[in-house]
Image (spheres, rainbow, N blue to C red):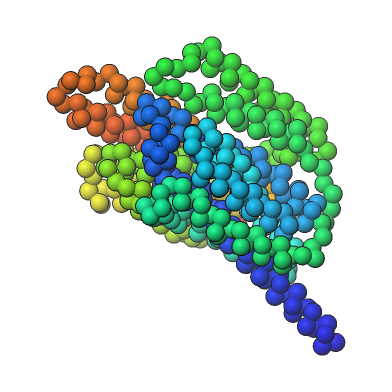
Amino acid sequence: MTRALGLRLSARWQASWLLAVAALGVFFAADDQTSVVAVLPSMIEGLGLPQDRFYRAAWIVNGYILGYVVAMPLMGRIADTYGHARVFAAALLLFCAGSAWVALSQGLTMVSVARAFQAVGGGAVVPVAMAMVAANAPPGRRALGFGAMAAAAEGGGLIGPLWGGGIAEALGWRGVFWINLHMCLPLAAACLWLAREERGLQRRALDLPGAALAGAGLALLTVALTDDPIEGRGLALDLALYAAAATAFAAFLLRQAKAREPLLELRLFRLPRLSAAIVTSGLGGGTLIVAMVGVPLFTNAVLGGSAIEGGLTLMRLSVGLPAGALAGGYAAARFGAGPTAAAGMALAALGFAGMAAWSDDPSPAAMTLPLLTAGLGFGLTIAPVNSAALGQGGEDRRATTASLLTIARLIGALVGVALLTTRGLGGFYAEAGLVPLDDPRFEELVRGLEVDAFQEVFLVTAAVCILAVLPALVMGGRASRPE
């Protein structure tokens, strides 16, 4: 009896340590997603990317998002087959290999491909970690485990810009990726050791053709959106790319409608409140990424700040996110998911409107207040969007519904980055090229055009935030409040 009790206690401690390792892995994977935005100006300079080819830098971010979106639904099913902890460790090893590949890459194309490979590991970390909680935590403590994993993801994302900026100042931008190996390789080894007796749970079908079609559609859409603002490829080729993307998406949807175990359950979109939450999540992701990428770039390009200064500037938005998330949970319970999320997007719009007023020498208050307002607004939407979606999706589809929200947010971010670099800031280089080099006011004129470009981007983003208020309201009032 004593031996049996000891075995149970040993198993409990082993499971606890395993979940602690998983939480650290989630933290570092989330950290990498946002740390890159602080070092993006350094990467552009280090890779020798000409300023008039700035639009191509979108692939540093979008390559990662593409890999992440495609990997996320597949890796959960692979984990069910081969064991959650083993697949989690394999995901960390892929993430480390991709990080090393990025650090060794010499050109933009290779960096972008390496980022996509890195994201295959990073995209698996969160869903597999959640499955590890469900498999290893006692029923009464699973909610705490899910909350811990979510906190690790949010914490990593919050500290990422400051982390990346600080490491880039000390070790250069490549150091940001090298350090991932020091952090994650020990975690992978610990995970394999702790789960040495784990067995797979069930054999599940993998819709690899469906994943390929979705990846092809997203890649084609990103190529279509990312174009040279000075020497565009022409309307005919643009239309051909959009048509090819639409064809790939149509083929993907057709396959999902017929698949026995689809990656995307189309019937969930028949639920209006769930669909509204997904649209709100997508628009929120697309607008948030503009701030995440645009603010460090503004700090670097207009204000002449360093990578760590860009990270510190963005932290003014980041600190508002958890405060807004906490307030959003209380507000959604009292006023309902729809009004709370709508208020959050309206606050975000107000923040971007304030950012659109930035000059080439804004005061600290003029920078802090809009960023904090936008962060509070985005944070305010987190709880009501998740509450409305998970409440509509049903208990047996909570993981699928949560994945849909994440994928929608990432697709919004993918589109947002492409439009920011090509249609937004990319247009600055087209206009700057028209300023005569011998004009005595050359620097002043170019600086003015640069400020105008950022102001236009932030103003358009504010308008998109206002647009997001509409689907947010469809999520419902007090009747849809979280239980």
Image x and y of residue 234, in percent: 48, 13
Residue 301 vs 126, above or below: the answer is above
Image x and y of residue 116, in percent: 59, 39
Residue 402 seen in the figure = no
x 41%, y 27%: residue: 53
Outermost bottom residue = 2
Report the side of 223 relative to 125 (left or right): left
> Count the marks: how many?
0
| Residue 449 image-quadrant placement | top left
Outermost top residue = 236
Image x and y of residue 322, in percent: 46, 58
x 40%, y 49%: residue: 172
Report the side of 86 relative to 36 (left or right): right
Foreground residue among 459 and 302: 302
Residue 385 seen in the figure = yes
Report the side of 190 relative to 42 (left or right): right
Q: Dividing the image into 4 quarters, which one contains the N terminus?
A: bottom right
Image x and y of residue 403, in percent: 65, 47
Foreground residue among 379 and 155: 155
x 80%, y 83%: residue: 5
Q: Dividing the image into 4 quarters, which one contains the C terminus?
A: bottom right
x 54%, y 26%: residue: 223
